Image (cartoon, helix red, strand yellow):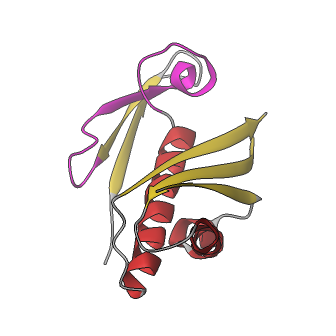
Amino acid sequence: MIRKAKAHWSGNLKEGKGTLTTASSILNETNYSYKTRFEDGAAGTNPEELLAAAHAGCFTMAVAAMLTQKNITPTTLDTEASLTLEGLSITHIHLSITGVIPGITADDFTTITKDAEKNCLISKVLNIPISSEAHFKI
């Protein structure tokens, strides 16, 4: 399986602008620029935001897969990924997941999320510290 995305850029770094498009068309000429990457309030996305979204999605699916292996179906799983950018370095990603899951304990959920933190596909390719916290709702 190969997944594809395209980036287009016009102009210099600070005044230029670009678009991102994915094969699925979920991103379709979505705006990105220096301002959307390094300044607040500009409309558009940036590579770091997309990485955080990808990590949140991958981690959440990994938790769901681990629960499924135990024949447990979560009612809901919600994850927020917070990516820390210091200068021109991504230094940390923190994953905060909230789960409504009948049939397990909060400790079981924490164990599963710690496993997913280390083993989801996105976590495996990143060479930065990753942390997570689990919030369990009955």
- Queried whether the magenta region covers residue 54, the answer comes back as no
| Quarter residue 74 falls in | bottom left
User: What residue sits 60% from the left and 50% below the top?
Assistant: 96
- Does 128 appear above or below 120? above
Instruction: Report whether 95 appears left or right of 8.
Output: right
- The quadrant the N terminus occupies is bottom left
- Does 124 appear above or below 19? below
Nearest to the observer: residue 29 or residue 101:
101
Nearest to the observer: residue 99 or residue 29:
99
* Extreme residue in the left direction: 25
Find residue 17 and report its horizontal and vertical position in percent: 44, 23
Nearest to the observer: residue 77 or residue 14:
77
Find residue 27 and report its horizontal and vertical position in percent: 28, 41
User: What residue sits 24% from the left and 38% below the top?
Assistant: 28
User: What residue sits 49% from the left and 73% below the top?
Assistant: 104
| Quarter residue 103 falls in | bottom left
Nearest to the observer: residue 103 or residue 122:
103
Find residue 130 and report its horizontal and vertical position in percent: 71, 59
- Write the start and end of the magenta stretch as one range: 22-45
- Queried whether the magenta region covers residue 29, the answer comes back as yes
